[in-house]
Structures are given as structure tokens and as C-alpha cells.
Amino acid sequence: MAELWVDPARCQGHARCYMIAPDTFRIDDEGYAHVIEGRESSYEEEHVRKAIRTCPERAIKILGA
Ligand code: F3S
């Protein structure tokens, strides 16, 4: 099953994902994004899709898609 994932090697902490979809992404103490536990399959929701598109580093991936 496909799941949403933030590539830690690409994330630079722009936080646009969090601003668009705070129900799906959280920002850690160092400023990097992670998918909130339980939200790994939310990639088809419109605001999550927008967050994926908006990341300037293209750090948000859909694994297994
Ligand atoms: Fe990182 Fe992109 Fe979000 S750089 S904090 S995944 S907007």
C-alpha cells in the first residue's frame, strides 16, 4: 500500500507543507517535516496534494505509488 513520506535528505524546513496541511505534517524541533502517524495514506486529499506540489525541494514522496 502506498504511503506518504518526507525524504529527510531533501527537506530543508520550508514548512509550506505544514502551513497547507497541518493535520498531516508536523515540524520537529530542528525544523524538518514528518508525516503525522496515522496520516500516511492521506495523499489523495486535495490539500495534501497541494502540499506535495508546493514543497520547493520536492521532498514529499508517495512511496509505493
Ligand atoms: Fe520540508 Fe518541503 Fe515541508 S522542505 S518542511 S517538506 S515544504
Image: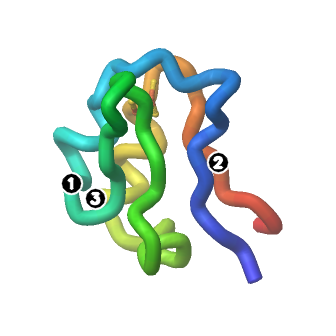
Quarter of the image for the C terminus: give it: bottom right
Disc 3 designates what residue?
Answer: 47
The image shows residue 33 at horizontal and vertical percentages of 42, 38
Residue 42 makes an appearance in the image: yes
Image check: 25 left or right of 18?
right
Give the spatial CA distance, label 1 vs label 2: 17 Å
Camera-nearest residue between 56 and 32: 32
Q: Hey, which quadrant is residue 42 in on the image? A: bottom left
Q: Secondary structure at mark 3?
A: helix
User: In percent of the image, x 81 and y 67: which residue is there?
Assistant: 64
Camera-nearest residue between 41 and 54: 41
Mark 3: few/some/many CA within 10 Å (<14, 14-19, 20+):
some
Disc 2 designates what residue?
Answer: 61
Image check: 3 left or right of 56?
right
User: In percent of the image, x 25 and y 54: which residue is there?
Assistant: 21
Q: Secondary structure at mark 1?
A: loop
Disc 1 designates what residue?
Answer: 22
Q: Compared to 58, does 42 lie above or below?
A: below
Q: Amino acid at mark 3?
A: His
| Figure quadrant, ligand 1 | top left
